[in-house]
Amino acid sequence: MNLALTVCLLVFVLIFFLRIPIALGMIAAATSYFLVKGGDLSLVANQIINTYYTNYIIIAVPLFIFTANVMNTGKVTDMIYGFAHALCGRMRGALGHVNILGSLIFAGMTGSAIADAAGLGKIEIEAMTEAGYEPAFSCSLTASSATLGPTFPPSIPLVIYAMLSDTSVGALFLGGMVPALVLSIALMLYVGFIARRRNYPRGKKIRLQEFLMSSLRSLPALLTPVILLVGIYAGVMTPTEAGAIAGFYAILISIFVYRALGLKDFFRVIVDSVRDIGATSIMIGAASIISYIVAREQIASNLGVWIIEISNNKYFFLFLVNVVILILGMFIDTSTIQLIFVPILIPVARTLGIDLVHFGVVVTFNMMVGLCTPPFGMLLFITSGISGTPLKDIIREILPQLAVMIIVLFIMTYIPQTIIFLPKILGLM
């Protein structure tokens, strides 16, 4: 730890405690580093701008954000919820299962946990509460199921990880499929157990004709993930192009099929998208200069040497990484973890012979667990805000669900085939 690096770290910590936006904190910390080091300050701006110009894949992030906003404004989320509801029929705790299935389907369109919780989640929480489910349980399950968004393809965090690690986006997307399905099944088993204990109501019986009508109405929305995934894996489009096509398709079905996106609504979508994209882009650009400093100071290689001196066992390393990210997720935003902490770990994982697709999906899912972890889990605040449910009640309900998610995390960590099975079959690894 030389003087310049020490000052950089102190400035970053100070800004973090002052609650200044984290992106500005990273830029200020980097600037202080170069001031003390006596380096060229133009490197800060140059590194940030180069990030946007040299990473074609990063364009996919704003495109998927835009798609999520269009779908939440149009009736697409309503159609997804209606289809999931028709699938669950007379099951005990049916609306809990609908919550999970709806999030899994929505995950195949947007890749965002926040979009799921804020859009589809509002419909789910209201329906469950009206049917007699405790509001806190409804909110906690909505938060848990929203983590499927960044795990199942397409996924915004996996796109960012691909940029950081130079890993195939297609392989990462395929790698997230099985873990997302495993998590869905695990959460549905938990809902089934709780539904019997608390005597939650069954869903209404759906006649075949009603089911077919619901499926027909939902078909344009359900085709979104099919178009995306088939297009990507057939080689017709790149993930970035898929993001553009998804946004265009979402506009088409919202306007011409569901007739739910007027000019005023579309303007609001653009405003919301610009705000969300701006915040995300500044974070990515600011993190690039921190990554430059990390590389310049050889922090990653020094960390790798230190870890290997303790143990060169890759499973111990994965355990250590999981524990650290779970702890960080309790206090720090996931984007900060991904853009600052994860790039330091990638070279170490590569040195220990860990497959970077496996590592990327594990780390991404672990960060999503952090979105549900008290005291600062973002999904907890979102579900509390849209429902008016006290945060302490949601935290009490989500603890068992966190245990379920951590079990799935360790399955993913120590059974790599759950992740790399599909990419290998399709020849992406």
Image (cartoon, grey):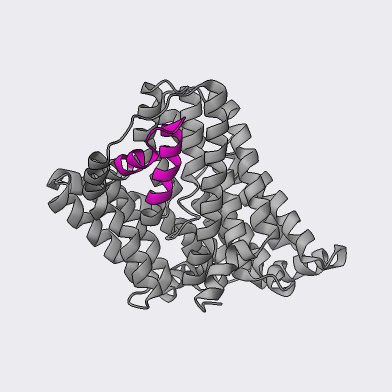
Residue 247 in the image: state x and y as whole percent: 27, 59
Residue 189 sits above or below residue 155 on the image: above
Q: Which residues are magenta?
A: 81-105
* 32 sits left or right of 349 in the view: left
Q: Quadrant of residue 232?
A: bottom left
Residue 349 in the image: state x and y as whole percent: 69, 68
Q: Residue at x 27, y 52 (%)?
A: 221
Q: Nearer the viewer, residue 299 or 348?
A: 348
* 277 sits left or right of 75 in the view: right
Q: Nearer the viewer, residue 128 or 327?
A: 128
Q: Residue at x 48, y 60 (%)?
A: 284
Q: Residue at x 37, y 74 (%)?
A: 238
**Residue 103 lies within the magenta run:** yes
Residue 45 in the image: state x and y as whole percent: 47, 67
**Residue 166 lies within the magenta run:** no
**Quadrant containing the N terminus in the rendered view:** bottom right
Q: Nearer the viewer, residue 20 or 70?
A: 70
Residue found at the very far front of the displayed protein: 208
